[in-house]
Image: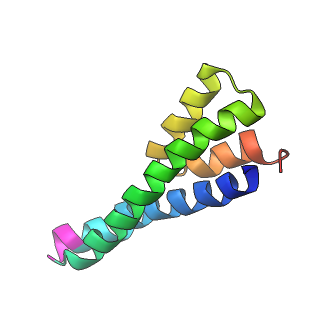
């Protein structure tokens, strides 16, 4: 489960960066909404999976609520999931 969460955290982080630095400029500068809708939907699904997996991994790794909170906050900060994966999951898998 930890390896799956590592992969999911990387995918979720990449999808957030794609939204922020690719599809949002396309939407607001070039008036192209298609990429934002597709990547946005994928990001939404990945985000929900990330939250569920974080809660499941909390019990497996016996995280306290502070650690879980930090892991969840990392999902909304650009590059946060990459940092979280290295700090909390790197040596667990």
Tell me if residue 29 is in the magenta stretch.
yes
Left or right: residue 42 compared with residue 74: left
Tell me: 75 left or right of 29.
Answer: right
Q: Relative to 32, is 43 above or below?
A: above
- Residue at x 73% of width, y 40% of height: 87
Q: Position of residue 50 (x, y in %)?
A: 53, 49
> What x and y, as percent, mark residue 28?
17, 67
- Per the rendered image, the range of residues in magenta is 27-31
Q: Looking at the image, which residue is at 33% across and 65% down?
A: 41
Residue farthest to the left, as pictured: 31
Magenta: main secondary structure: helix
Residue at position x 85%, y 46% from top? 91
Vertical arrangement, residue 27 with respect to residue 61, above or below: below
Q: Is residue 70 left or right of residue 32?
A: right
Residue at image location 83% in from the left, 44% down from the top: 92
Answer above or below: position of 59 versus 40.
Answer: above
Could you say which quadrant of the image residue 68 lies in? top right
Say whether residue 67 is visible.
yes
**What colour scheme has been applied to the protein in the rendered image?**
rainbow
Residue 80 seen from this side: no
Where does residue 37 sit, x and y in percent of width and height?
A: 26, 70
Q: Is residue 42 above or below residue 73?
A: below
């Amino acid at each position: 489960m930890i390896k799956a969460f590592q992969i999911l955290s990387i995918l979720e982080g990449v999808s957030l960066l794609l939204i922020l630095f690719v599809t949002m400029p396309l939407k607001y500068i070039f008036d192209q909404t298609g990429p934002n809708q597709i990547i946005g939907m994928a990001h939404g699904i990945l985000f929900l999976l990330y939250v569920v997996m974080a809660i499941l991994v909390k019990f497996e790794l016996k995280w306290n609520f502070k650690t879980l909170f930090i892991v969840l906050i990392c999902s909304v900060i650009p590059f946060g999931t990459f940092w979280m994966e290295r700090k909390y999951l790197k040596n667990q898998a």
